[in-house]
Amino acid sequence: MDNLDISTIDGLRILKVKDKVLLAHQIKPPYYFSCCDGLILLPTNEGNQKTVILDLNIEPYLINQINDLYGPISDYICTHGHMDHIAHVHQWESIGAKIHAPIPDDTCLLDLHNFYEGFQFDEALDFSIIEKFGELNGYNTCKEIYPFKPGKSFLFDELEIKTIPFLGHSKAHIGFLLVQEKIIHISCLGFDQVKPGVDGFGPWYGFKECSIDQYLKDIDLAQSIFLEQAEFLTSSHSYIIENPDITPFLYMREKIEKNQNIIDQAILTLKLENKSKISLEVFLDMDLFFPKKKMDKFRNEIYKYWESGIIHKHIERSKYLK
Ligand SMILES: [Zn+2]
């Protein structure tokens, strides 16, 4: 199936995954972490009576146009509390959708302080940095959230949506299985190729709470659900995959392995032997993952915080250290 852009909205690409399931993508996000792709589930006789939106965090003016075209929208499900998944959700609320979000990240949608403390930015950065980060990404708060535990199944009229915990990425992070439609949406698990062959960063585990071990289990789980129960795979930052293409899973595992190699090489070059004697600063100065030296002070601080999380996790896994 070739996925033609059926969008009539400027600035938005809309692909048909299936007849009543659309994948939407904001073409030019205003800042690095302000948007993510998500699904529009149109009403059907056998399923939902009103449109349901899954994790489509795009700018408010686009949300209004989707509402004009495909509304009314009854429900919106957010997948986790990272900025590119929460910034504009308030607009879905203001056009009348009930907002569901997984515990514990649900509180990030209500107050930026919860985002700041929940992801432990407070241990390394001033709140003013996160305030600026929120502002640049257009963050605004919601008034009311309906929290749920990762793993919960939703039933909107006859439409069944299973949420799948993929907790390596965040304590709340979920994917979706559209049971009748046979579509798995793996959200931010780490398949971020916007086109076949175009490289991205891959799985993201810059926060303290992320876990590479859990990630590897999540990738296996996603692969088996995809191969056994789904025809199509979508995600927050990629193109549509058709069963039995396992590119996303190979890509994600490979990325994690590559990152491990980067740290292992640095350990060998620096002739380090003992985990307890390592200072992260030496690794950070090498700009191993992000070109921090080229960044302005503000981005440098945030990326430094994330990169230390990534480096730390690979140091822990290195076979070259005692
Ligand atoms: Zn994320």
Image: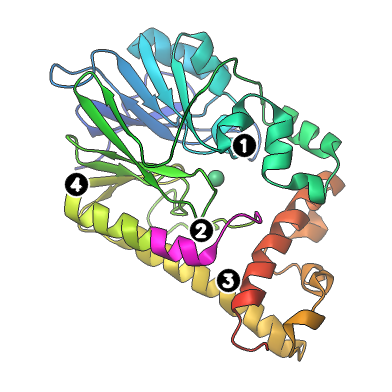
| Mark sitting earlier along the chain (1/4) | 1
Quadrant of the drawing holding the N terminus: top left
Q: Which of the labelled discs sits on residue 202, or is there none?
A: 2
User: Is residue 188 in the magenta section?
Assistant: no
Q: Are marks 2 and 4 in contact (CB under 8 Å)?
A: no
- Measure the alpha-carbon separation of dots 1 and 4: 29 Å
Which of the 4 image quadrants contains residue 161? top left
Residue 246 in the image: state x and y as whole percent: 29, 61
Give the answer, above or below, for where 279 lies relative to 181: below
Which type of secondary structure does the marked residue at label 4 adopt?
loop
In the displayed structure, would residue 238 be above or below residue 221? above
Q: Left or right: 99 with respect to 70? A: right
Task: Give the residue number, with chain letter if any, for mark 3.
Answer: 259
Please indicate, yes or no, whether residue 21 appears anywhere in the rendered image: yes
In the depicted view, which residue is nearer to us: 114 or 232?
114
Q: Name the residue nearer the viewer: 175 or 139.
A: 175
Tell me the CA gap for discs 3 and 2: 10 Å
Q: Which residues are magenta?
A: 207-218
Per the image, the residue denoted by label 4 is 231
Residue at 58% from the left image edge and 71% from the top image edge: 259
**Which numbered disc, 3 or 1, marks the residue that appears first in the sequence?**
1
